[in-house]
């Protein structure tokens, strides 16, 4: 195997392990599953139970309509918590990847090795993605089973679409941003504080409206375009006879992917330059 | 977060203020249009005026579309136009509005600013007339040449719907033209609004269901989309036809009474009106407009529905009457039985019942006693709200003797016995409100009148605009009051305890007086017993206090081919609930066979308000206060001890550790929220901005204050001859002091921008949650030895309380078994608004939240008492695990 690829995978594997061993991702997973199970208990698996006018009698619906109705509930209730956690919490949780290396002096160790800054950075991001995806996969499976037991059959494709095109997209983009933005910080404490500010401030500075997706809905790390797309799917699908719009059919999702990738690329370039500059200075 | 909140708000529409909602619909009704739909906000933003609305305004029908649309529908001035709407007013925009204004003026200024200037026949009238002629000519010119108007009646003409169809169902609309007096088919013509909800079923049957709405006085056509969705009508295997009965809803003429103003309505509710003059004025106006009121009754309306069947070309139809609609159905069966395939009577009002002698049936009192008994059988309800009947009667007597003056939306409301009685009566219409009755009575008894104010709020805003008062008066007076005497009505009233007699203003002796003022019409004899062999399903609700099950049983006896089904745990208008709707659907599929009843209705848990759990809150607050005082005292003692032990405070190091970033962030955010619109992103206001920012940032800071695994030089710190807890206290003190300073400035700004708030409450909004989240963050960090955990828990907690904080307020519908926990949650809601509960409860909550925060801080310090465990790990078990891991090499 190519040495660089071997290094890349080594860093990624290290990062993956560390995120799970620090139990931060365990907390994220438990939070996602816990919140949604709490919602299941509160709403009884049917968000429309709070809006009696939309309450449908399963006996009066066809099997197909029932499946559609369950899918609406599953996607909406799950997305509310998952979307928010992926937007706000995950990037903060994974932001200590590089600062902790500095805090524990592992960073010095890495720099003493024949390991380039680009490989180190890419490995870190890959490791965070790997760990985040594994957390999401675990949540996806556990919640999928829970939902199936709670409400019965629902559209698995729509459910997977929500996780892959929605949660994974936001999670991967924002976790990478989290790692990169915090990479200049010397300790976990500083990184968490900085990221807390960076992921809360944008929502204030660049408000995103639920009904009006402007360019800011793509640029803002809150990823309002995708968040709103899946939230509005519920209301839209309730009244739209043509049914469901999948994430891969939505411009909001592809637009977010494009803009987010650009953001990561630009930021990665800047951070790489900074690390090189630090190396040169040292 | 802001992105989530609106959608969550829509879907988490709560039953908050339910009693008010219910009353809004039922004030003078024998049945609801749809109790459930009223909680739903409009889904689509309104766009512009519909042509129908314009025409309605032009015809001077006083109330136009607004009468049809209560809280669920857009305001009349912005009534949405369907995308495919025909626009006959193809005139320039400005001109169109000019026409509308002119027509509005002619109509008596109900819609516009124009004043009623009846009798002035000067230049302005001439100009108005000319304008109308021009408008009319423009309309005529916009009509296709081939559209030759047909004049025969009855006939049905399709038209564009008056509402925006937001559902997936196809809804067709049209006008049914019928004679005003069916005895004179060549006479004056009126038209009724009709909506047909098309079935999507592959097994669609040719005979539709014709829905006969209750009231009398309410419209249903304007609600067709929500009715279709809410009742699942579109999924049934029959078309459903909604008709606005003559004089009601969108039908023309409309017999609304804008003379009955909101202020007057509020007086009417408490029966403190000096006269019925607005009713008299309304009748005079309607008659002056050429409406012949004697033809607006159930007999004529029944003929309308017979005409509907022939005009639409149906061989057979099914009738589905609800409440007053059952009386109409019975009249149709009696007078026009041809073509009726089956009948569903939901909450039956037999023709023999005279609503002015109505109180004699005990149904109000019996249902109240049933609620009291159900509450007594429930441990939690009985413990919290015992002796319900006694409490109610005492309360009634108290308010009757000493009425309380309230103010709602700037209008005076007299809370007397009559108003209390009416509120309780109205709450009994809806299942969700029934379970609120005990809490309502106890909270009112405790001096909390917010529920009363909520119930009156809709009246204060809109009066009785959604009810066709003219129709209601003509029907009820001619068919009830005119067939009895005042003495008989009074005797029926007096046969009941005062707290249970004639709750609704149009019933009993009071209703008789109103009819006398209105002008007692010639009696319409419509009280003959109906007998029929048409297959009939009679449905009743156990808790129905206005058309009790005995009414349904009475009618069922006269129908040999009838099936009677009584549903437990439900009140009036049962088919708006899924189980009875399912039974109805089965019956319609095979009306000759008794439908299977394989579902049940469960009464929701009784609502526990803060009054019920207040004793526990007092205990909790007491404990929290003692703990806090003890903690502060201990701290002071320890400080003095520390001075004696000659170790001081490391403030400078603490400042360095805490850093300035968070402080700057707080200041920046508060400045942004104060001076820009950025606060809207968080649904914050000047009042709530400080409580939103400070607890979050302080919580995260506290979580990051001290984590053994992240602490540089931990061994050195531990080796110092001072407790490690001091390090945490110093840092926490720095955080709390600096952030409190920022919060103080923020609060002063908040008070400057929103001076209406109470200063003490403004401070209490952020101080307890700040302590709560800081304690929580510190505790989680210390227990897990990982500051990320603390920060995440604080973030999630803050997020959850902000997004779903209202779920912590009493009365929210949690599923079993969380419903037993829900009544207590308000005590620990960190962001409780001062006006969400009574003032005393708010302060109890503040003390408890603060106490919980202090307790978390104390627990944190307790976990730091042993330096060795701080250095190695907090728990021996964890140490063993680490050793095991070290051995396994993972």
Image (cartoon, coloured by chain):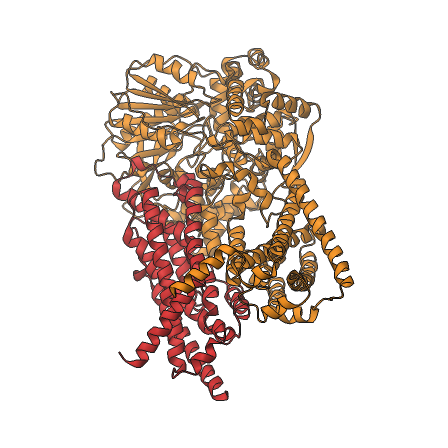
Q: Is residue A84 left or right of residue B147?
A: right
**Residue B711's quadrant in the figure?**
bottom right
Measured as percent of width and height from the top left, residue B772 is found at 61, 53
**Residue B683's quadrant in the figure?**
bottom right
Decide which of B265, A30 is in the foreground and name it: A30
Measured as percent of width and height from the top left, residue B570 is found at 44, 27
- At horizontal 59% and vertical 50% (from top left) the residue drawn is B831
Q: Colour of chain A?
A: red
Does residue A194 lie above or below A279 as drawn? Answer: above
On-image quarter of the C terminus of chain B: bottom left
Q: Is residue A133 left or right of residue B854?
A: left
> In this view of the protein, can residue B184 be seen by the observer?
no
- At horizontal 43% and vertical 48% (from top left) the residue drawn is B43
Task: Count the numbered circles shown.
Answer: 0
Decide which of B460, A212 is in the foreground and name it: A212
Q: Is residue B639 left or right of residue A229?
A: right
Measured as percent of width and height from the top left, residue B118 is found at 57, 37
Name, please, the residue furthest toward the left: B203
Colour-to-chain, orange:
B
Does residue B373 lie above or below B427 as drawn? Answer: above
Decide which of B138, A109 is in the foreground and name it: A109
Decide which of A81, B427 is in the foreground and name it: A81
- At horizontal 59% and vertical 21% (from top left) the residue drawn is B389
Measured as percent of width and height from the top left, residue B814 is found at 47, 39
Does residue B200 lie above or below B719 as drawn? Answer: above
> In this view of the protein, can residue B290 be seen by the observer?
yes
Q: Is residue A44 left or right of residue B583?
A: right
Does residue A29 lie above or below B50 as drawn? Answer: below
């Amino acid at each position: 195997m190519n040495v660089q690829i071997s290094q890349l995978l080594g860093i990624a594997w290290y990062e993956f392990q560390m995120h799970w061993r620090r139990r931060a991702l365990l907390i994220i997973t438990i939070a996602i599953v816990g919140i949604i199970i709490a919602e299941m208990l509160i709403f009884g698996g049917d968000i429309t139970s709070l809006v009696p006018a939309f309450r449908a009698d399963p006996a009066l619906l066809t099997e197909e309509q029932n499946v559609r109705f369950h899918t609406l509930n599953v996607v909406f209730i799950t997305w509310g918590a998952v979307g928010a956690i992926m937007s706000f919490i995950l990037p903060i949780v994974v932001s200590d990847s590089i600062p902790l290396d500095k805090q524990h002096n592992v960073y010095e160790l890495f720099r003493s090795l024949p390991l380039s800054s680009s490989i180190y950075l890419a490995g870190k991001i890959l490791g965070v993605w790997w760990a985040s995806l594994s957390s999401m996969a675990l949540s996806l499976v556990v919640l999928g089973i829970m939902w199936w037991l709670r409400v019965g059959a629902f559209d698995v494709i729509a459910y997977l679409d929500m996780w892959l095109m929605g949660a994974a997209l936001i999670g991967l983009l924002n976790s990478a941003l989290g790692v990169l933005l915090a990479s200049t910080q010397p300790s976990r404490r500083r990184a968490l504080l900085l990221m807390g500010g960076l992921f809360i401030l944008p929502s204030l500075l660049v408000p995103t409206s639920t009904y009006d997706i402007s360019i800011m809905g793509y640029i803002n790390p809150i990823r309002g375009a995708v968040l709103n797309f899946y939230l509005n799917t519920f209301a839209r699908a309730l009244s739209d006879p043509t049914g469901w719009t999948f994430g891969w059919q939505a411009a909001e999702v592809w637009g977010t992917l494009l803009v987010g990738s650009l953001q990561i690329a630009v930021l990665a370039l800047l951070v790489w330059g900074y690390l090189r500059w630090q190396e040169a200075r040292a | 977060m802001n992105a989530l909140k609106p959608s969550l708000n829509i879907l988490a529409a709560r039953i908050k203020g339910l009693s008010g909602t219910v009353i809004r619909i039922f004030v003078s009704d024998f049945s609801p249009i749809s109790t459930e739909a009223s909680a739903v906000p409009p889904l689509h933003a309104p766009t512009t005026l519909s042509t129908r609305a314009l025409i309605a305004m032009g015809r001077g029908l006083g109330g136009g579309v607004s009468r049809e649309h209560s809280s669920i529908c857009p305001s009349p001035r912005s009534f949405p136009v369907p995308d495919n709407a025909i626009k006959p007013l193809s005139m320039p925009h400005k001109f169109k509005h000019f026409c509308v204004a002119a027509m509005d003026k002619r109509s008596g200024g109900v819609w516009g600013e124009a004043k009623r200037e009846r009798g002035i026949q000067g230049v302005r009238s001439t100009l108005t007339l000319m304008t109308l002629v021009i408008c009319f000519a423009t309309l005529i010119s916009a009509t296709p040449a081939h559209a030759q108007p047909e004049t025969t009646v009855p006939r049905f003409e399709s038209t564009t719907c008056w509402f925006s169809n937001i559902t997936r169902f196809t809804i067709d609309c049209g006008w049914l033209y019928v004679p005003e007096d069916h005895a004179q088919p060549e006479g004056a013509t009126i038209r009724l609004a009709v909506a047909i909800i098309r079935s999507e079923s592959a097994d669609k049957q040719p005979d539709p269901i014709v829905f006969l709405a209750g009231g009398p006085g309410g419209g249903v056509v304007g609600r067709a989309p929500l009715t279709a969705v809410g009742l699942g009508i579109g999924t049934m295997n029959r078309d459903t036809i909604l008709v606005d009965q003559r004089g009601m809803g969108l039908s023309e003429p409309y017999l609304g009474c804008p003379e009955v103003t909101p202020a007057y309505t509020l007086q009417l509710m408490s029966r403190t009106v000096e006269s019925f003059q607005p009713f008299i004025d309304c009748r005079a106006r309607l008659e002056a407009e050429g409406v012949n009121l004697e033809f607006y009754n159930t007999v004529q309306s029944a003929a309308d529905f017979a005409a509907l069947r022939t005009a639409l070309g149906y061989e057979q139809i099914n009738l589905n009457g609800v409440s007053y609609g059952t009386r109409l159905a019975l009249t149709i069966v009696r007078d026009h039985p041809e073509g009726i395939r089956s009948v569903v009577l939901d909450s039956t009002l037999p023709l023999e019942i005279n609503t002015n002698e109505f109180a004699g049936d005990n149904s109000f009192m019996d249902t109240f006693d049933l609620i009291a008994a159900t509450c007594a059988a429930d441990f939690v309800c009985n413990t919290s709200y015992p002796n319900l009947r006694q409490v109610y009667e005492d309360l009634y007597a108290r308010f009757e003797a000493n009425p309380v003056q309230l103010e709602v939306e700037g209008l005076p409301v007299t809370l007397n016995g009559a108003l209390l009685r009416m509120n309780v009566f109205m709450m009994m219409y809806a299942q969700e409100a029934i379970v609120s009755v005990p809490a309502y009575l106890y909270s009112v008894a405790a001096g909390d009148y917010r529920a009363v104010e909520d119930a009156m709020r809709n009246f204060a805003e809109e009066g009785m605009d959604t009810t066709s008062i003219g129709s209601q008066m003509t029907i009820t007076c001619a068919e009830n009051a005119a067939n009895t005497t005042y003495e008989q009505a009074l005797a029926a009233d007096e046969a009941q305890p005062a707290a249970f007699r004639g709750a609704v203003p149009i019933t009993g002796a009071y209703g008789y007086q109103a009819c006398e003022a209105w002008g007692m019409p010639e009696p319409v004899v419509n009280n003959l017993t109906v007998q029929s062999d048409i297959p009939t399903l009679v449905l009743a609700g156990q808790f129905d206090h206005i058309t009790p099950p005995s009414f349904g049983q009475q009618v069922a006896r006269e129908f040999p081919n009838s099936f009677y089904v009584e549903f437990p745990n439900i009140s009036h208008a049962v088919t708006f609930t899924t189980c009875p709707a399912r039974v109805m659907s089965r019956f319609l599929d095979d009306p000759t066979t008794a439908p299977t009843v394989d579902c049940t209705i469960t009464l929701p848990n009784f609502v526990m308000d803060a009054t019920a759990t207040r004793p526990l809150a007092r205990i909790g607050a007491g404990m929290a206060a003692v703990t806090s005082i003890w903690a502060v005292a201990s701290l002071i003692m320890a400080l003095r001890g520390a001075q004696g032990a000659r170790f001081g405070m490391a403030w400078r190091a603490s400042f360095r550790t805490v850093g300035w970033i968070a402080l700057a962030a707080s200041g920046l955010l508060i400045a942004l929220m104060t001076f820009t619109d950025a606060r809207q992103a968080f649904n914050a206001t000047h009042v709530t901005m400080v409580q939103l920012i400070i607890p979050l940032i302080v919580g995260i800071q506290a979580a990051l204050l001290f984590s053994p695994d992240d602490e540089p030089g931990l061994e050195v710190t531990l080796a110092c001859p001072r407790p490690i807890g001091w390090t945490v206290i110093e840092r926490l003190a720095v955080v709390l002091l600096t952030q409190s300073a920022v919060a103080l400035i923020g609060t002063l700004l908040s008070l400057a921008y929103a001076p209406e708030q109470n200063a003490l409450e403004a401070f209490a909004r952020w101080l307890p949650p700040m302590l709560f989240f800081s304690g929580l963050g510190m505790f989680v960090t210390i227990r897990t030895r990982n500051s990320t955990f603390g920060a995440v828990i604080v973030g999630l907690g803050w997020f959850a309380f902000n997004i779903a904080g209202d779920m912590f307020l009493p009365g929210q519908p949690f599923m079993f078994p969380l419903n037993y926990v829900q009544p207590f949650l308000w005590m620990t809601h960190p962001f409780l608004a001062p006006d969400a509960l009574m003032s005393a409860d708010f302060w109890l909550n503040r003390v408890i939240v603060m106490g919980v925060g202090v307790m978390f801080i104390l627990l944190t310090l307790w976990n730091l008492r042993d330096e060795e465990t701080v250095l190695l790990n907090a728990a021996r078990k964890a140490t063993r695990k680490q050793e095991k891991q070290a051995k396994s090499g993972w």
